[in-house]
Image (cartoon, grey):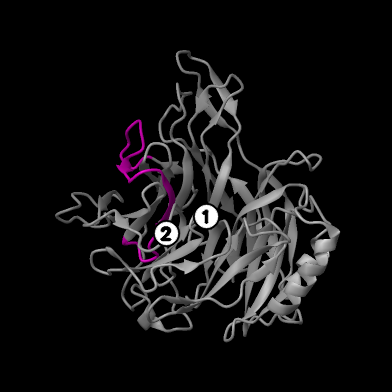
Amino acid sequence: MSKRFAWLLGVVVLVSIGVLVACGTTYNASSDGLVLVGSQGSGLIETFSFNLGSGSVSAISNTPTDTSNQTCVLNGVPSSLVLDPKGTYAYAIINSVSTCAGSATGILAFKVNSSGSTNVVGSLVAFNSGTVTIQGTAGTESVAVVPNTIVMDPAGKFLFAADRATTDDKGLPVPGSVSVFAIGSGGSVTEVAGSPFFTSNPATTLLQSAIDIVSVAPTPTVFPAIGLNGVQNSVCSAVGLNPPTSQYLYAVDGVGNQVFEFGVDTSSGVLKNPSNGSSVPSFSTDQIPAGVAVDPCNRFVYVSDSHTAKVSGYTICNAVSSGCPLADGSLQQVAGSPFSLSGSASSPGPLVVDPFGNNVYVVGTLSNTVSPLKISPISGALAPMSPATVATGQGPMSIAVRGDDNWMFVTNFGSASPGGTVSQYAITPATGALTAPPAIPTDNLPWGVAVK
């Protein structure tokens, strides 16, 4: 991919890094956190350490000073990026790009070293093509999927990828799907039998574009561990509360204004239809949903509605009640949903529930903001916090919160050249309030982010 800045502007990069990123590259796992960033400018993964007390940042590997003239390091461009629960392995979608010879799309695994650097593990694992029936015929065809984002289940067993709507070689629309990979020893990944999974069986080509899966989120089979802040900050880590044995995956359709519910076989990762019908159950959202997040305590699901600047909230039916005739993972709208975002928030996209299930943070992709919202632990209703929005850089793309609920990071894909940035936020655990230290200078076009 072509670089967005010239050699002369490299001097400016050096100056800005000297000011905003502390000197030294020592990473100490007992006192430092680690941030991984996927740069599409150079096609690589960057790592940065940050002091858990002060937030002071140090660049570790593939820093902007030594990657500004590189391209195609991973022979493609990394997008969505996740870490396993132990912080031992990271996984990225690598997208093929014409400027990198022999480039291909797939999942690439990285070992996270004790120094904070990363190295590639194994080879790129390509996505299986989807098999669809050509509408009006008995014939089938294989169509390559277009992965958008990946998430990992909280137990660290599977990767789930949201596959966008696409077209076949005749221009016929093909619905989106979900690809699933099982995580093995040494960070290896293998696509599970039957993947990718469609929302209807059999899947067919369509007359117009529909079922565009833009984001997915699984329910937990483990509850959050008691973190550095203590059990009082987690609503589901109390003694005697057992995590669920059933697992569901919710997939957002950005065209059909709906969220689908798959069942997950927790042994194999195979997706199934919990209703045993020909089509996977779906539930209405507001207009043009863009992101989905599941409460780590298995109570609620939240969907960002990009067109209306709202967030839809749902209760997960885990037990039979007046609103849930069956404990089947189906969704019931939370009273008052969808909830309007306050302040300047516009076009909400990615969103996360904090690791202890107290707050939702929503990225405003056009307003360059993050909206912090408080979760009612009883109803799941959302209430804005003060301030209603906190600024990011230009073009926020991805968001990640550290497992101790103390730090949050947002990549800014559209930050002005030279280079890009990652916005860093200290979280006050008792309230969820955000404080923003200076942004972290990165190589240009940062997309995915993960934090250890």
Vertical order, 405 against 371 (above or below) = below
Relative to 120, 407 lies left or right = left
* Crowdedness near tag 2: few (<14), some (14–19) or many (≥20) residues, C-alpha within 10 Å: many
Whether the magenta-drawn stretch holds residue 450 is answered as no
Q: Residue at x 60, y 81 (%)?
A: 55
Read off the residue under disc 2: 345
Label 1 secondary element: strand
Read off the residue under disc 1: 151
* Crowdedness near tag 1: few (<14), some (14–19) or many (≥20) residues, C-alpha within 10 Å: many
Q: Position of residue 429 (x, y in %)?
A: 42, 80
Give the residue type at disc 2: Ala
Question: What is the distance, in whole Å, between disc 1 and disc 2 at their CAs?
Answer: 25 Å
The quarter holding residue 103 reads: top right
Q: Nearer the viewer, residue 74 or 393?
A: 393
Residue 62 is at least partly visible in this image: no
Q: Main secondary structure of the magenta part?
A: loop
Give the residue type at disc 1: Val
* Residue 306's disc number: none
What is the residue that sits farthest to the left in this orientation?
322
The region drawn magenta spans 273-299
Q: Earlier in the sequence, mark 1 or mark 2?
A: 1
Vertical order, 57 against 6 (above or below) = below
Label 2 secondary element: loop
Q: Residue at x 43, y 55 (%)?
A: 346
